[in-house]
Amino acid sequence: MRYSQMLLPTTRETPAEAEVISHQLLLRGGFIRKLSAGVYTFLPLGLMTLQKVTAIVREEMNRAGALEVLMPMVQPGDLWMESGRWQQYGPELLRFRDRNDRDCCLGPTHEEVVTDIARRELQSYRQLPVNLYQIQTKYRDEIRPRFGLMRGREFVMKDAYSFDADDEGAAASYERMRVAYNRVFSRCGLDFRMVEADSGSIGGSYSHEFMVLAETGEDTLVLCHNCSYASNVEKAVVKTPAAGPDPAVELEELRKVETPGQKRVESVAEFLKVPPQQIIKTMVYMADEEFVAALVRGDREVQTVKLKNLLGVSEVESLTEDQVWAAQRLPVGYIGPVDLPLRVVADNEVMAIVNAVAGANEKGFHYQGVNPSRDFSVQIVGDLREIAEDDSCPLCGGSLYFKEGIEVGHIFKLGTKYSEAMEATFQDSEGQQQPFIMGCYGIGVSRIVAAAIEQNHDANGIIFPLPLAPFQVILLNLGPNEEDLSAAADSLYQELSAAGVEVLYDDRDERPGSKFNDADLLGIPFRLTVGKTFKKKGKIELRERRSGETVLLAAEETLAEVQARIQSALGL
Ligand code: ATP
Ligand code: MG
C-alpha cells in the first residue's frame, strides 16, 4: 500500500479529549475518528488492526470447534421479556419501537437470540455439544463511555455460546474456551493474566477474566508472590480471622458522644483517639429496590460485588449523601448499626471488634462502647470487605501483590438460567426433555486494539506487537524526487509485496523528519529507509521499532532479512 494513496490523517498535537495514551495515539495516528460519545469510525489503518485481531480470534474459535454465525443486532423486546432481562437490564440496553409499535433493542449481548436458535434447531442430545459464535458490533448505552476504544457505546465483540447436555459436557466446553482464549491472547503478543472472576449466583470456579496488564486498567488483579493464585479483586476471598471478640476485654457501656463535623473515619479516629480498626464503618446502598447497610472495619472498604452476592440481588448501587438523607433521614458520616431501621450485612471482622465506635444516626454524634453481639442485630455476616495487599493469599497463605488490568475477555458458565426461562430443551438419552446447560464467552475485539497500545508504546508512539500491526514493514523513500533513490525504493516495495510482506510504502513528498515521526507514531514493527546511506554506500537501513536497533543491508539481502525477522517475531 502506498502512503500517498492512503487515508492516513496523522497529527502532532495531543487531542484534548483523550485522557489515556491509546486513545491519544489512535486519534493522532489516524486509526479512528469519533462520531459521537463512545461511537467511532475505524479509518483504514484502524480497520486493518481490528481485522488482525479478528482473524486471530476467528482462527482460534474455529480450532476449538465453535461454529461462526451472525445474529441480528436489532432484537425483539419479546425475547428479552421471556428471559426477564427486559426488566432487569438497566439503561445500558438501548430500547426503541419500530413502526408497528413493537418493542426492540440493540443487542448488547446475545443470550436471548442464541437461546431462541437453540430451542428451534437443537432437539436431541445427539446434536450436542454445540458452540455458536459471532464477531459483531454490540451496542451498550454505557453511562460513562470513555478512553476511546476501551469503553465505547458501540464496539466489536466476539461472543460465543455453548450448549451441552450435562454438567460434564459443559465443563469440557468451558475448558475448550479457556484454552482457546489463552491461545488468542498469546498469539496477539500481549502480556495477560487469566484471573478468577465473580460468577454471581452460579458460584464455583466457572468464571474467568482475561486481563491485559496495563497501568490504565480499570480492574485490579490480586496475584500471589508464592503460588499461581490470580483473581479479580471483586472476587478475592479474604481468609477469615478465626478469632471472635476477645473475651478478656471487658465490655464498656454504650454511650453517645459528640463528634461535631467528624464524618470521616480518620477524623473520628483522631478526634476520639481510637485506632480506625476500632471503628465500624456503615455504608448505605440500594440493593435492587431495598436500602441496606453494609458494615466493615474503619480501615477497610466494602466490596460491592461481594455485597451483591451475599444479598443475592442483581444490582448494588452506591448512593449520594442527599439520596440517603432524602429517603431515610440518615446523615451520612454519622450512620451506625445501633437502632438502624435497615437490613444489615456485616463483614466477619466487624463481629470481632470489642467496644467499637459507630455512628449514632444523628448528625454530630457517635456511639462508643458498641458491641456487635449486644447492641445491634445483623442479618447477614460474611466476607464483605475488599481484600488488601497485606492480606495473605487465600490459597497458600503467601504474600499478595496487586496489578492493574484491562479486561479483554470473559468466560462464564451460565448453567440453565436462559434455557429454563426461555424453555429451551432437548431430548436426553432417556427421552426426557432437559434444559440446555449453557456457557457464554466474550472477547472485546476492539478493546484489544486499545489494550495492546496501552501496553506497548513509548514517547514517540505506538509499538505494535507484530501480529496486530496493520503493516509489518514501513518503507521510507527519503528521495521521492531523486531517481536513484526512488528506483531502489520502488523495486524494494515490489519485491516485498510480491513475497507477501505487508508493506506501507511512504512515497510521499515529505521531509525525512516527518516521515520518521509518522513511522514511529504508527508503530509498525520494521522500518526500512532508502536515503542518504543508500546514496553513499548502497545500503538500506532496517530499524526495529521496539528496540531501536538498526542494521545496514544490501538491497538484495533485505527481503530475506525482513522475512527472517517476521518469522521469528511470529514464533514460526
Ligand atoms: P466491563 O466490566 O468492562 O463493563 P462487562 O463485564 O460488561 O465488561 P462482558 O459483558 O463480559 O463485559 O463483555 C465481554 C467483553 O467485551 C469484555 O470482556 C470486554 O473486553 C468487552 N467490553 C465490554 N464492554 C465494553 C465496552 N463498553 N467497550 C468495549 N469493549 C467492551
Ligand atoms: Mg459492562
Image (tube, rainbow, N blue to C red):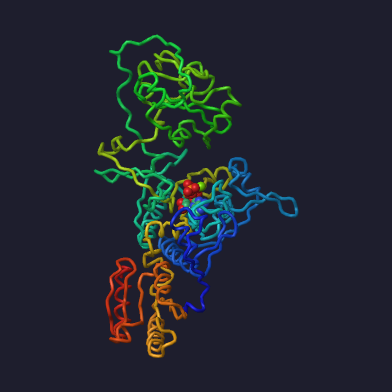
> Compared with residue 313, is residue 272 higher up or lower down, i.e. above or below?
above
Judging depth in this view, the residue of 443 and 322 nearest the camera is: 322
Residue 60 appears in the picture as rendered: yes
Question: x, y percentage for residue 113?
Answer: 58, 53
Q: Looking at the image, which residue sits at the far right?
A: 100
Where residue 295 sits, quadrant-wise, is: top left
Question: x, y percentage for residue 272?
Answer: 38, 18
Where residue 347 sits, quadrant-wise, is: top left
Judging depth in this view, the residue of 507 and 168 nearest the camera is: 507
Give the residue drawn at x 48%, y 44%. Answer: 415
Question: x, y percentage for residue 553?
Answer: 28, 81
Residue 160 appears in the picture as rendered: no
Where residue 546 sits, quadrant-wise, is: bottom left
> Compared with residue 276, is residue 236 higher up or lower down, i.e. above or below?
below
Give the residue drawn at x 59%, y 53%. Answer: 107
Question: x, y percentage for residue 117?
Answer: 57, 55
> Compared with residue 49, is residue 23 higher up or lower down, i.e. above or below?
above
> Compared with residue 222, is residue 542 higher up or lower down, i.e. above or below?
below
